[in-house]
Structures are given as C-alpha cells and as structure tokens.
C-alpha cells in the first residue's frame, strides 16, 4: 500500500477531529474522501500531508512518515493562498524553485487545458484562481496528490474542466485523494470511496463494489452517512 494510516487520532483542545482512523490506499487510484461537514476530512488530508502531527497512531507514505516524505506529496488546501501579484510566468519560476519535481511544461499544458488566462492572480476570478492552483499542484510529479474541495464554490463548467484535468493527469504510480461535497458530479472519476463520520472511516469500498451492490457513490453517501 502506498498510503497507510493506523489508529490515527488528532485533537484540537477538547475536540477530537480524527478518532482512531485506519486507512490503506494503493497506488494508481483516485479516491473520494467523503463526509458531511465536520467529519474530519480536512484534518485527515493535513495529517497525510505532514502538516499536522497525530496525537496517537501513525501514518506512512511508502513506508515513511509524511513529514519525511513531503517532497513526494502535492497538497491543494481548501483555501489555497498565493501572492496577488504573481502571474503565470512568475509562478512557473517560483514553483520550480520550491519543488524539484515541478514540471513547467506540464504546468503550461494544464493552464491551457483549464483555460486559465495569462494574467496576475489579482486579475483572476475565483474560478480562474481555483484552476490556476490546481494546475500548479498537478504539475508536480508527486506520489500522493491531496486535493481539499477543489470543486467548491466554482461553476459547473469549471468543475468539468477540473475533473477532466484530474483524469488526464492520472498515473499508475501515484494516488489521488479528492475531498468534495460534489459527490454526484465527481463520482465518475473515483476508483474508491472512503466515507468518514465523526473522525472515523465508516466505509472504504471500491466504486466497482458499490456498483455491484446496485449503488452509486452518491447513494452510498446518503445511506452510510444519514
């Protein structure tokens, strides 16, 4: 398994955000990390990214703790921030300096595919910024891609472009974890669905398993998390 989490717990004061979470994900899958608000999805992604440390348990990426494997992890937070003055040319230079695995040519290809204009972030719409940050994330040649609500707050056409970019970027040696509330729109790209409730995984199943039960991912979401 590329990703393994074993009995991971993370607290914020008296609140348990992730509670004894155990999860294993192989290479080559697009995984939907699904749950209602407050289920612990964002905290789980940050634990996998090595940005938070567990209070108990451990997580591993290809056998190493996430904090030691950050160079192999590309993380797109829900509210990604970037310098307002940054434009496409400046971004390519900055990301190339920060990340040895950043691929400038792929970045420009993704910008074209996502129809991101060549202007500064300050001049971009919310949807254009979302596509810009996604292109920067996918342009890295990482082993683990963590995407927190990349479809949130953008129009339907932008969502379609984002999902198409994810499909085009798929590699069999990488794992893609996508947290989203737009389950019905995104489920077509999922190989696996992981459902979280109150900081725990309540179901992890392949999309094929769900289809064999006569369920879509969206139907399973309603049934498991109701």
Image (tube, rainbow, N blue to C red):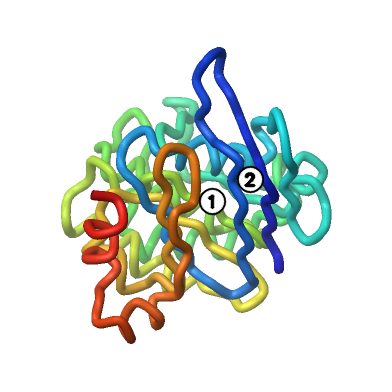
Pick whichever, 120 or 72, lies toward us. 72
How crowded pointer 2 is (Cα within 10 Å; few <14, some 14-19, many 20+) is rated as many
Please give the name of the residue rendered at 44% of the width and 44% of the height, measured from the top-left corner.
148
Q: Is residue 180 left or right of residue 1?
A: left
Q: Are marks 2 and 1 in contact (CB under 8 Å)?
A: yes
Does residue 202 appear left or right of residue 24 in this picture? left
Residue extending furthest toward the left: 156
Check the image and report above or below for 190 versus 60.
Answer: below
The image quadrant where one finds the N terminus is bottom right
Circle on res. 48: 2
**Marks 2/1: CA–CA distance:** 8 Å
Q: Position of residue 95 (x, y in %)?
A: 63, 43
Q: Residues within 10 Å of mark 1 (few under 14, many from 20)?
A: many
Depth check, mark 2 against mark 1: the one in front is 2
- Residue 214 x/y as whole percent: 24, 82
Give the tally of numbered discs: 2
In the orientation shown, which residue stands out farthest toward the bottom? 212
Position in image of residue 156 (x %, y %)? 16, 56
In this view, 122 is above or below 152: above
User: Left or right: 215 with respect to 74?
Assistant: left
Q: Quadrant of residue 11?
A: top right
Asked where in the image residue 125 lies, by quadrant, the reply is top left
Image coords of residue 213 (percent x, y): 30, 81
Residue at image position (65%, 31%) is 52
Is residue 151 or residue 92 the one in the foreground?
A: 151
The label shown at residue 146 is: 1
Q: Secondary structure at mark 1?
A: strand
Which secondary structure lies at badge 2? helix
The mark nearer the N terminus, 2 or 1, is: 2
Q: Residue at x 83, y 52 (%)?
A: 64
């Amino acid at each position: 398994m590329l990703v393994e989490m074993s009995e991971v717990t993370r607290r914020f004061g008296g609140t348990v955000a992730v509670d004894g979470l155990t999860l294993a994900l192989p290479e080559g899958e697009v995984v939907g990390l699904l749950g209602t608000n407050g289920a612990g999805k964002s905290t789980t992604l940050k634990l996998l990214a090595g940005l938070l440390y567990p209070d108990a348990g451990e997580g591993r990426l290809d056998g190493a703790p996430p904090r030691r494997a950050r160079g192999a992890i590309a993380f797109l937070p829900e509210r990604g921030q970037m310098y307002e003055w940054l434009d496409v040319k400046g971004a390519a230079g900055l990301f190339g300096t920060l990340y040895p695995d950043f691929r400038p040519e792929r970045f420009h290809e993704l910008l074209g595919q996502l129809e991101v204009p060549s202007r500064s972030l300050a001049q971009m719409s919310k949807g254009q910024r979302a596509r810009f940050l996604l292109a920067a994330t996918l342009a890295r040649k990482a082993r683990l891609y963590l995407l927190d609500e990349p479809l949130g707050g953008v129009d339907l056409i932008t969502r379609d472009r984002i999902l198409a970019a994810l499909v085009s970027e798929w590699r069999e040696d990488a794992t893609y974890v996508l947290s989203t509330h737009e389950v019905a729109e995104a489920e077509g790209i999922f190989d696996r669905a992981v459902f979280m409730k109150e900081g725990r995984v309540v179901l992890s199943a392949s999309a094929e398993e769900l289809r064999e039960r006569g369920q879509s991912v969206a139907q399973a979401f309603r049934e498991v998390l109701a």
